[in-house]
Amino acid sequence: IAVNNRKVLEGIYRALGIEDITSVLRVMDKIAKIGEDGVRDELTGTLKIEAAAADVCLAAGRISSTDDRFVEDVRALKVSSDLLDEGLNELAFVMQSLADLPDGSVSADLHIARGLDYYTGTVYEGVLVGHESLGAICAGGRYDNLVGGGSKKMPGVGVSIGVTRLLGYLFGNDTLRASRAVPTCVLIALPTDEDRPAANAVASTMRQRGLCCEVFHEPAKFGKQIKYAERRGIPFVWFPPVGGEGEHEVKDIRSGEQQMADPDQWMPPAEDQHVRIITD
């Protein structure tokens, strides 16, 4: 987790005479994407910031430490402001409070800007060790005015976790695999349209017992319905009595084993009841 404080950055920028703080923060937040040269070009070109001030902004962004030594590094930039002092004190307090965490798990990194203008204090981003190319997989910060009523304002600290980014990366690299492609455990075969109410009743009974099932969408030959289950990775096909005559049967389409079964009592093996996540 890389931690910073917006007051540190804003204090530095104000000490340099920069007025459009929000725009500078948004540019500095791109440093991991476009590099220092790209950031310098935007600062001096688009935002018309003097080259010397841009160099100080970039020098601040290089400061990083796993304890409170960053304070000395910031002081070495030879800039000062009351807001900067306040931010350094707050960031030092955070780092001191986290000193008992495993070495290297948290660092004060002044390149973390979080470009959104509603952050007012501590900001942070997290990356996966060994998968840094994925970028930040969680981020957030402090809002002084998160909620309020009337004249009363209440602060808060929030974090957002990139679940889609994480899962897309892990599944894409085959680090995580699903035991089957769909949640459905049982396909209820549909012999005829007249048998649809009975098929729906079987599905309802199984769902009440926690089994994920679906009724085939149209009457068709059983071979076609079995092939549908095979394509979808559904392990079991349930055959209700045609016209209400006969016994219920269930087929494990992987082994070909078929047996009579009671929809009120039959349960598949535990490993087939739900999709399982397989890890290497």
Image (cartoon, rainbow, N blue to C red):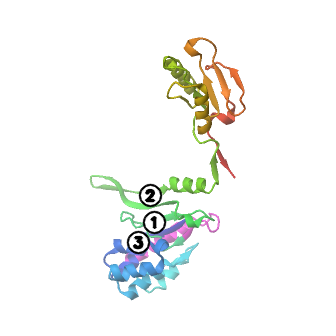
Distance from the alpha carbon under mark 3 to that under mark 2? 15 Å
Q: Is residue 233 above or below residue 10?
A: above
Other-residue count near label 3 (Cα within 10 Å), few / some / many at <14 / 14–19 / ≥20: many
Identify which residue is drawn at 53% across, 60% down: 137
Q: Amino acid at mark 3?
A: Lys
Distance from the alpha carbon under mark 3 to that under mark 1? 8 Å
Distance from the alpha carbon under mark 2 to that under mark 1? 8 Å
Q: Amino acid at mark 1?
A: Thr
- What span is in magenta? 81-107
The answer to which image quadrant residue 29 occupies is bottom left
Identify which residue is drawn at 71% across, 29% down: 256
- The numbered mark, 3 or 1, whose residue comes first in the sequence reads 3
- The residue to which callout 2 is attached is 157
Q: Nearer the viewer, residue 11 or 115?
A: 115
- The numbered mark, 2 or 1, whose residue comes first in the sequence reads 1
| Residues marked 2 and 1 touching at CB (< 8 Å) | yes
Circle on res. 209: none
- The residue to which callout 1 is attached is 122
Where residue 46 sits in the image (x, y, percent)? 33, 79
| Residues marked 3 and 2 touching at CB (< 8 Å) | no
